C-alpha cells in the first residue's frame, strides 16, 4: 500500500527570505526603504517627485513598470539616481529583482523609494525589503477604494490621498473614505496632498523623516 505525502512550501518563502536579507543590508547601510503602492493613474511618480524635491536628503529610486523607462529618465534628468525594472507583463515586483536592481545603483545612505507596478492587488502580497509601505490613492478614483481593495489599506503604513485640489469639482465622500480606512488600519496616517500644486508634502516628508529615525 503506497502513501503519498504532500509537502507544500509557501510560494512566498524564497521571496520573503530575500526580502529579509535585503532589509537587513539596507538597514546596516543606513538606507530607509519605502515601497510605493497605488493603482495606475493615481500620481505615484508625480507624488514621488514632490517628496524627493522636498526631502532634502540623499535619495534614490527603483522604478517598476511593465514596459518603458519614461519615469526613470524623468527622475535622472532631475538629478536623482534611478534604475529601471521592466516586468514584461508581471503585475508586481519581487525581492530578487529589487535586490538585483539595487546592486546597479551607486547609493550608500539615505532614502530608497521603490515605485511598484500600478496595481492594488498583487504588489501588496510581496515583500521587497522595505521598511514601510506608502499607499497613494487619488480623489478622482472615488471614495470606495478601502472597501474594494482592503489588503492594500490594511498593510499600508502611510496613505496619501492625491489630487485633493480637485475635491471641489468631483463627488468624493471623505467621511466614507476615512471610515473605511479606520476600520481596516486605524494607525495609518492619511495625508491630503496634491502632486500638481505640492500641497501637503511638507507634512508627508516630516513624517517619513521621523519614521526613518526609528529604524
Image (spheres, rainbow, N blue to C red):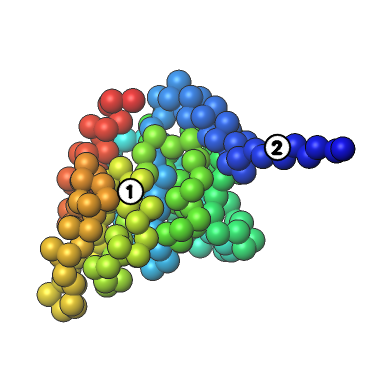
Q: Is residue 24 left or right of residue 146?
A: right
Does residue 193 appear in this view?
no
Task: Give the residue at x 39% y 49%.
Answer: 36
Q: Residue furthest right?
A: 1
Q: Which residue is mark 2?
A: 7
- For mark 2, give the secondary structure: loop
From the viewer's side, name the closer residue of 2 and 172.
2
Q: Label 2: few (<14), some or many (≥20) within 10 Å?
A: few
From the viewer's side, name the closer residue of 79 and 161.
161
Task: Give the residue at x 60% y 40%.
Answer: 10
Percent position of residue 151, x then y: 38, 53
Mark 2 and mark 1 lie on one chain; the one further toward the N terminus is 2
Q: Residue furthest top?
A: 28
Quarter of the image containing the N terminus? top right
Percent position of residue 83, x then y: 54, 47
The disc at residue 154 is 1
Percent position of residue 201, x then y: 21, 50
Percent position of residue 124, x then y: 45, 50
Between the residue at mark 2 and the residue at mark 1, the CA separation in whole angstroms equals 30 Å
Residue 91 versus residue 167 in the image, above or below? above
Q: Are marks 2 and 1 in contact (CB under 8 Å)?
A: no
Does residue 215 appear in this view?
yes
Amino acid at each position: 500500500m503506497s502513501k503519498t505525502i504532500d509537502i507544500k512550501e509557501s510560494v512566498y518563502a524564497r521571496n520573503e527570505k530575500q526580502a529579509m536579507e535585503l532589509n537587513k543590508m539596507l538597514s546596516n547601510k543606513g538606507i530607509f526603504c519605502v515601497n510605493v503602492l497605488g493603482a495606475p493613474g493615481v500620481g505615484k511618480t508625480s507624488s514621488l517627485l514632490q517628496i524627493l524635491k522636498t526631502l532634502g536628503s540623499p535619495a534614490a529610486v527603483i522604478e517598476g513598470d511593465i514596459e518603458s523607462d519614461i519615469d526613470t529618465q524623468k527622475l535622472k534628468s532631475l538629478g536623482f539616481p534611478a534604475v529601471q525594472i521592466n516586468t514584461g507583463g508581471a503585475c508586481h515586483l519581487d525581492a530578487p529583482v529589487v535586490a538585483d536592481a539595487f546592486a546597479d545603483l551607486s547609493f550608500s545612505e539615505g532614502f530608497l523609494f521603490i515605485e511598484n507596478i500600478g496595481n492594488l492587488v498583487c504588489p501588496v502580497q510581496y515583500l521587497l525589503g522595505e521598511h514601510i509601505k506608502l499607499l497613494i490613492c487619488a480623489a478622482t478614483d472615488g471614495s470606495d477604494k478601502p472597501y474594494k481593495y482592503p489588503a492594500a489599506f490594511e498593510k499600508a503604513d502611510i496613505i496619501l490621498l492625491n489630487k485633493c485640489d480637485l475635491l471641489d469639482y468631483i463627488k468624493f465622500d471623505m467621511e466614507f473614505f476615512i471610515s473605511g480606512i479606520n476600520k481596516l488600519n486605524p494607525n495609518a496616517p492619511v495625508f491630503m496632498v496634491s502632486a500638481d500644486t505640492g500641497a501637503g508634502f511638507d507634512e508627508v516628508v516630516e513624517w517619513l523623516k521621523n519614521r526613518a529615525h526609528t529604524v
